[in-house]
Image (tube, rainbow, N blue to C red):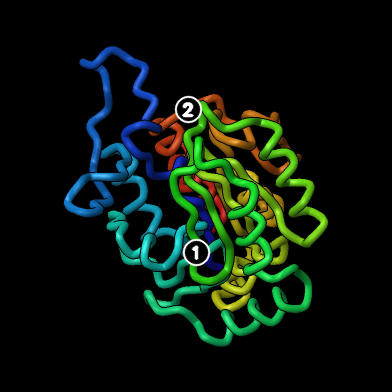
Amino acid sequence: MPVLVASDLDRTLIYSAAALALTMPDARAPRLLCVEVHESRPLSYLTETAAQLLTELGDTAVFVPTTTRTRKQYLRINLPGPAPAYAVCANGGHLLVDGVSDPDWHARVLARLAAECAPLDEVGQHLADTADPVWLRRHRVADDLFAYLVVERELLPEDWVKELAVWAENRGWTVSLQGRKIYVVPKPLTKSAAVREIARRTGAELTLAAGDSLLDADLLLAADRGWRPGHGELADSGWTAPTVSALPQRGVLAGEHILREFLRTAREGS
């Protein structure tokens, strides 16, 4: 039976220059491969060793990139190895099959959101009314499914995020603070639901997962085995679960270690 490997991307497998955490002497820093260019600028990296591991993983398991990125943002990424047959974008709002969103899946997601959550317009209006231009840099809507803010983190009042989380909770939404971005996402919009659908379609009986943020918690809990790096929202809060390994590694080397664990476990499982 195939092994399914569902992994978050940003700050789990791939890293911006600011998130690399290259704390070793320069001469010992790993060689890096750029896997994303945006507006003619290099944006995301992994180590060359990680690139080789990911290539091997693609030949060993069903590798599924599982991201909160929109489809457009995801398609900017050029990962090494075989092109994934499946990908999860917009936190589960889109299930891509050979790069194309499955319309039936998307329709099911929209129906559930309409039945269980306050509308996106209400959330967007609340953000517009309460966010302070002193620290707000951008307000975006992702694939007409959820909203996120880009902020100046050092100016952001901690109480504002807590108050937003309480407000959102009462309306069926959840809040996640990741670096300079605040995500406000409907609770039924989950990575785990889309990954379960892919497991059903592929016949996978073993699912492995990795992620660093609150929006990855449901994915990690749904997997048979999971890993989280030593940085990010889950690590900062001390989040753990019986089937999830909390790694000490931080930054781009954490991504490399996660891929080693994926490959080793997938080979044992298959």
Residue type highlighted by circle 1: Ala
The numbered mark at residue 102 is none
> Mark 2 packing: few (<14 Cα in 10 Å), some, or many (20+)?
many
User: Left or right: 176 with respect to 23?
Assistant: right
> Mark 1 packing: few (<14 Cα in 10 Å), some, or many (20+)?
some
Disc tally is 2
Residue type highlighted by circle 2: Arg
Look at the image and tell me whether residue 211 can be seen.
yes
**156 over 216 or under it: above or below:** above
**95 over 250 or under it: above or below:** below
Q: Find disc 1 in the rendering and name its residue.
A: 142
- The image shows residue 68 at horizontal and vertical percentages of 51, 57
User: Left or right: 226 with respect to 254?
Assistant: right
- The image shows residue 230 at horizontal and vertical percentages of 55, 29
Q: Which quadrant of the figure contains the N terminus?
A: bottom right
Task: Give residue 213's quadrant in the image.
Answer: top right
Q: Nearer the viewer, residue 150 or 214?
A: 150
Q: CA distance from mark 1 to mark 2?
A: 28 Å
Secondary structure at numbered mark 1: strand
Residue at the outermost right position: 170
Residue at the outermost top position: 25
Q: Residue at x 50, y 51 (%)?
A: 8
Residue at the outermost bottom position: 104
Q: Residue at x 70, y 56 (%)?
A: 222
Q: Nearer the viewer, residue 135 or 40?
A: 135
Q: Find disc 2 in the rendering and name its residue.
A: 250
Secondary structure at numbered mark 2: loop
Q: Residue at x 62, y 51 (%)?
A: 215
Task: Choose the circle earlier in sequence order: 1 or 2.
Answer: 1
Q: Residue at x 53, y 66 (%)?
A: 2
Q: Nearer the viewer, residue 28 or 70?
A: 70
